Amino acid sequence: MRIPIYQIDAFTDVKYKGNPAAVCPLEKWIENDLRIILYLKEKTFK
C-alpha cells in the first residue's frame, strides 16, 4: 500500500515556519497492524 505524505506548516501563514505536520490523505482507513508500525516509527524519531 502506498500512502502519500504531505508536510504542512501548522499554526502559521509563513512558509517553513510554525510546526511541521505530516498529512496522509487516505481513501479508506488503514489496518491496525500498519497503524501500530507507523506509530512506532514516529516515536523512534522523536
Image (cartoon, rainbow, N blue to C red):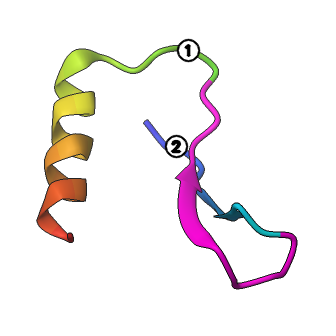
Q: Residues within 10 Å of mark 2 (few under 14, many from 20)?
A: few
**30 vs 14: above or below:** above
Residue beneath label 1, please? 28
Look at the image and give the residue range highlighted in magenta. Answer: 13-26
Residue 9: name its quadrant. Answer: bottom right
Residue beneath label 2, please? 3
Query: Please, what is the three-letter code of the amino acid marked with disc 2?
Result: Ile
Using residue 43 as the reference point, say whether residue 24 is left or right of it: right
Was residue 39 drawn as part of the magenta stretch in this picture? no
Residue 16: name its quadrant. Answer: bottom right
Foreground: 23 or 16?
Answer: 16
- Secondary structure at badge 1 equals loop
Foreground: 37 or 46?
Answer: 46
- Secondary structure at badge 2 equals loop
Using residue 29 as the reference point, say whether residue 25 is left or right of it: right
Q: Position of residue 13 (x, y in %)?
A: 87, 70
Using residue 40 as the reference point, say whether residue 3 is left or right of it: right
Residue 1: name its quadrant. Answer: top left
**8 vs 5: above or below:** below
Quadrant in which the C terminus is drawn: bottom left
Using residue 35 as the reference point, say whether residue 2 is left or right of it: right
Was residue 25 drawn as part of the magenta stretch in this picture? yes
Which residue is drawn at the image coordinates 53% and 56% (left, top)?
A: 22
